[in-house]
Structure formats: structure tokens, C-alpha cells
Amino acid sequence: MNKSHRHRLIARLLQGSNVRSQDHLKELLLASGVRATQGTLSRDLREMGVLKASTGYTLSPADNRKRASSDLEDAVQRHLLSVDAAGTTVVLKTEPGYASLLSAQVDLAPLSGILGSLAGDDTVFLAARTPRDARNTALQFQKMGGML
């Protein structure tokens, strides 16, 4: 596993559970099929800007937003098929079964002007504040998906 994939896995582990120590993180990684040395973990945590709090390791709020944006972009590039805007609604079409994943990524990386999302099997509806927000969001998704 390369470093960027390991960093994404570490971020998910930190968001999903209370990681108290590097040994605990090492165990969680191993349970996910990833072996890492203590030195590698120390470097990864430093590079990722992970903070040590009294409750355990945590990503800084800015890093959480940056990582969520990166995960959204990854999901868009892998699964988005088309984007349309109509009024204050943005319609995202995905491969069958991937709308929920994309919708969840939108919710984790909130977009300016978007109030919320609703997903079916292969369609995500985004509710925008204004028609202009809908058009801008559609354009943003087209750029992320390499459609422009």
C-alpha cells in the first residue's frame, strides 16, 4: 500500500474510532491488512498534522475538511457519469449502486450553497440555495469529474 492510501486509511480510522496510541493505530491498520512500523506511523502522523488530545489522536478540523474534499473528488472521478442543474436542484448520475457513496461524500465535504443531498441507487439530488448556486455546483462537479 502506498503512502497516500495509508494516509487515507489512517484518517478514516481516526474519524471512526478512538485511537489512543500508535500501538492501537498499528493494530487497527493490521486488522485492515496494512503493516506499518512505528517509525512509519510517527512520520505519517506528523505529515498528516494529527493532533494528540487527552482522548486520543485526532485530525485537525482543517485537515478533516481537506481530506473530505479529497475523498469527494476521488468518488466523483470514479463514479460520476453526468451532472445537470435545474432551478435549485443539481442532479448527479452515478454508476448503479454508487449514489449513496457520492451523497455521503458530499455531506462530509459540504459545498458552498448546498443545503443537503438525497440519494437513490444511481441518482443524487442536491438542494441548492439559489439557481446560481446550483449552476456553480454543477460546474464544480463537471470540473472534478473531468467533464469540461
Image (cartoon, rainbow, N blue to C red):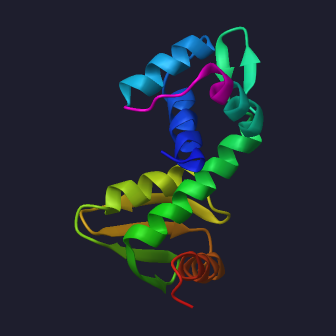
Residue at position x 45%, y 59% in the image? 117
In-front residue for pair 117/88: 117
Residue 45 % position (x, y): 70, 30
Residue at position x 24%, y 61% in the image? 97
Q: Is residue 90 found left or right of 135 in the rendered image?
A: left
Q: Is residue 141 above or below residue 28?
A: below
Is residue 18 at least partly visible in the picture?
no
In-front residue for pair 39/9: 39
In-front residue for pair 94/30: 30
Q: Is residue 62 above or below residue 115?
A: above
39 in magenta: yes
Q: Is residue 135 found left or right of 42 in the rendered image?
A: left
Residue 35 % position (x, y): 47, 28
Q: Which residues are magenta?
A: 33-41
Q: Is residue 107 found left or right of 92 in the rendered image?
A: right
> For residue 129, which quarter of the picture?
bottom right
